[in-house]
Image (cartoon, rainbow, N blue to C red):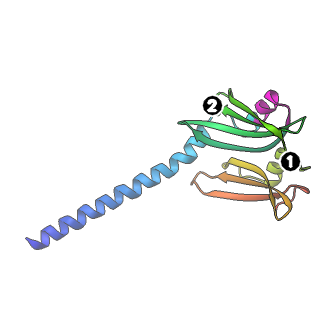
Amino acid sequence: MKKSTTLAALGGASLAALIAVTSAAQAHTAKYDAVTAVGTDLPAALALARAAVPGTVMGAELERHKGQMVWEIKLLDENQQRTRLILDADTGEVLKQKAKRKPARHTVEAVSIEAALEAADIPADARVIEAELERDDGKVIWEIETIGPDNTRTDIDIDGETGAVL
């Protein structure tokens, strides 16, 4: 009797572990699936953002906001005013637009986000989920993050002045 109780307990624990691993794998896969299911890809989101606020894109991120997939686009307009746009990732509709009251403290001359994405040579099956222009030790860098079909995230740094992969 003791042997069968132990085997049943081990079997139950194994089943629970299998369910937990399967659930984690499904949740992990759902991230890539959610990213590929959006109706507005990054180039389209950038065009829509620039139509709303002409200027230089300083960053873009695909994220879930209040249960909805959105693109957050940060721009520097022609007057050096910082603006943050939230676009519906399915329709491209501008959901929110907020300009910072203070102008940017410093501006940067950098390769465009499009040039940085081209230089990054992103695989066809990967999706960009973030591209941000940052300063790292005084150097301007485009930090690009992609997600692949197996949910592997890859970070690619592009020199903001030369467009070279770092």
- Left or right of 80 in this view: 47: left
Q: Position of residue 112 (x, y in %)?
A: 86, 46
- Give how far across and how far down residue 161 sits, in percent: 91, 56
Q: Residues within 10 Å of mark 2 (few under 14, many from 20)?
A: some
What number is the disc on residue 90? 2
Q: Which label sits in the foreground, 1 or 2?
A: 1
Residue with the most extreme front position = 102
Residue 25 sits above or below residue 90 on the image: below
Asked if 77 appears above or below 1 in the picture, the reply is above
**100 vs 136: above or below:** above
Task: Name the residue at 67% across, 52% down.
Answer: 146
Q: Amino acid at mark 1?
A: Arg
In this rendering, position of residue 128 left or right of residue 31: right
For the C terminus, the image quarter is: bottom right
Q: Could you say which is closer to the camera, residue 79 or residue 111?
A: 79
Residue at horizontal 54 percent and vertical 36 percent from the top: 66
The residue indicated by pointer 1 is 105
Q: Nearer the viewer, residue 12 or 105?
A: 105
Most prominent secondary structure in the magenta stretch?
helix
The residue that appears at 62% across and 42% down in the rendered structure is 63
Residue 53 is covered by the magenta coloring: yes
Which residue is more in the foreground, 122 or 53? 53
In front: 140, or 6? 140
- How far apart marks 1 and 2 lie (CA) works out to 34 Å
Q: Is residue 146 left or right of residue 55?
A: left
Residue 99: x, y in percent? 77, 34
- The span shown in magenta is 46-55
In the rendered structure, does residue 102 fall within the stretch colored magenta?
A: no
State the residue at coordinates (41%, 52%): 23
**In the drawing, what numbered circle is on residue 37?**
none
Q: Residue furthest left?
A: 1
Q: What kind of residue is marked 2?
A: Asp
